[in-house]
Image (tube, grey):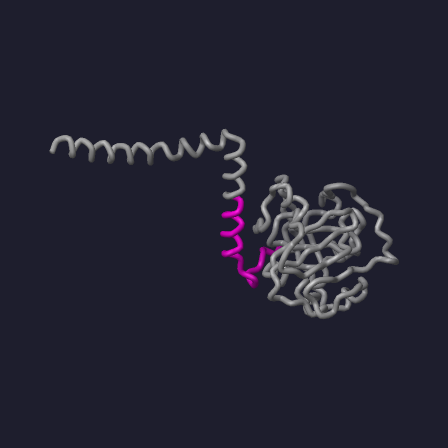
């Protein structure tokens, strides 16, 4: 009888001690590179899943008064490669492919013929800075309607003149503040800020807001996700 009691005590103590050791074991796993990579990837995946589950298509990002705008001269120019990839504006068009009824090349004038939306929103960079800017353009949702996009598809992917590429989930693409942006501060986009067309997505981190757009694809499967995401950064990264 005493032996049975001792065994039960031992098992109980063992379970308690293992529970106490769990955080230490997890921290220890981070010190081992293969486990570290797996744990970080799993944590990032869970964070993206949770953020996507909480995202509401019609919940707006904060907007601001004109008096709160960061001066245009102080709006940072941030690129992954070059400030100006040398787009020929006269020959530029946006090539549309994928799950759409009207694939083909679309001019800037066609995009500008869609209802124009202007908004003062915050741009947040993963490097730690943020600014409030004034952006204008066509809602991406309106453009998707124009091209007959299948909005049950999962993704909208864009490619850029500087070889950058990015994608967003369809819910984000349909958000009313997600813009195909062609103006900043009531002036046409400058080359350094992504002319002639860029994404403005105030519900997302800055690297999702690709510049110098050349191609747009609606798809259920992505051959590549995004320039930074394919190097381990968060895919959803909602704000």
The range drawn in magenta is 44-64
Residue 132 appears in the figure: no
Residue at 43% across / 34% down in the picture?
26
Residue at 62% across / 48% down in the picture?
205
The percent position of residue 80, horizontal first and vertical second, equals: 72, 42
Q: Quadrant of residue 203?
A: bottom right
Residue 172 higher or lower than 207, as above or below: below
The percent position of residue 202, horizontal first and vertical second, equals: 63, 54
Residue at 62% across / 63% down in the picture?
153
Is residue 60 rendered to the left or right of residue 77? left
Residue at 60% across / 43% down in the picture?
233
Q: Let me know if residue 199 is in the magenta part.
A: no
Residue 114 higher or lower than 232, as above or below: below
The percent position of residue 50, horizontal first and vertical second, equals: 49, 52
Which quarter of the figure is the N terminus placed in? Answer: top left
The number of numbered discs placed on residues in the rendered structure image is 0
Is residue 227 rendered to the left or right of residue 17? right
Q: Let me know if residue 57 is in the magenta part.
A: yes
Residue situated in front as seen by the camera: 96 or 132: 96
Residue 122 appears in the figure: yes
Residue situated in front as seen by the camera: 15 or 176: 15
The percent position of residue 44, horizontal first and vertical second, equals: 53, 44
């Amino acid at each position: 009888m005493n032996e049975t009691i001792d065994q039960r005590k031992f098992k109980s103590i063992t379970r308690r001690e293992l529970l106490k050791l769990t955080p230490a074991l997890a921290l220890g796993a981070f010190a081992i590179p293969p486990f570290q990579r797996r744990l970080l990837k799993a944590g990032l995946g869970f964070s993206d899943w949770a953020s996507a589950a909480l995202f509401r298509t019609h919940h707006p990002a904060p907007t601001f008064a004109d008096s709160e705008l960061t001066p245009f001269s102080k709006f940072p120019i941030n690129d992954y490669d070059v400030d100006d990839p040398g787009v020929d504006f006269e020959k530029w068009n946006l090539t549309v492919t994928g799950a759409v009824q009207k694939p083909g090349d679309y001019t800037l004038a066609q995009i500008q013929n869609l209802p124009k939306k202007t908004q003062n929103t915050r741009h947040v960079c993963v490097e730690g800075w943020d600014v409030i800017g004034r952006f204008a353009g066509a809602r991406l949702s309106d453009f998707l309607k124009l091209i007959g996009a299948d909005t049950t598809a999962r993704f909208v992917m864009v490619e850029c003149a500087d070889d950058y590429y990015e994608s967003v989930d369809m819910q984000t693409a349909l958000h009313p503040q997600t813009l195909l942006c062609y103006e900043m501060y009531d002036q046409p986009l400058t080359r350094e800020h992504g002319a002639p067309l860029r994404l403005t997505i105030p519900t997302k981190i800055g690297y999702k807001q690709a510049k110098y757009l050349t191609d747009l694809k609606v798809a259920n499967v992505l051959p590549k996700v995004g320039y930074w995401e394919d190097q381990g950064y968060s895919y959803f990264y909602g704000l």
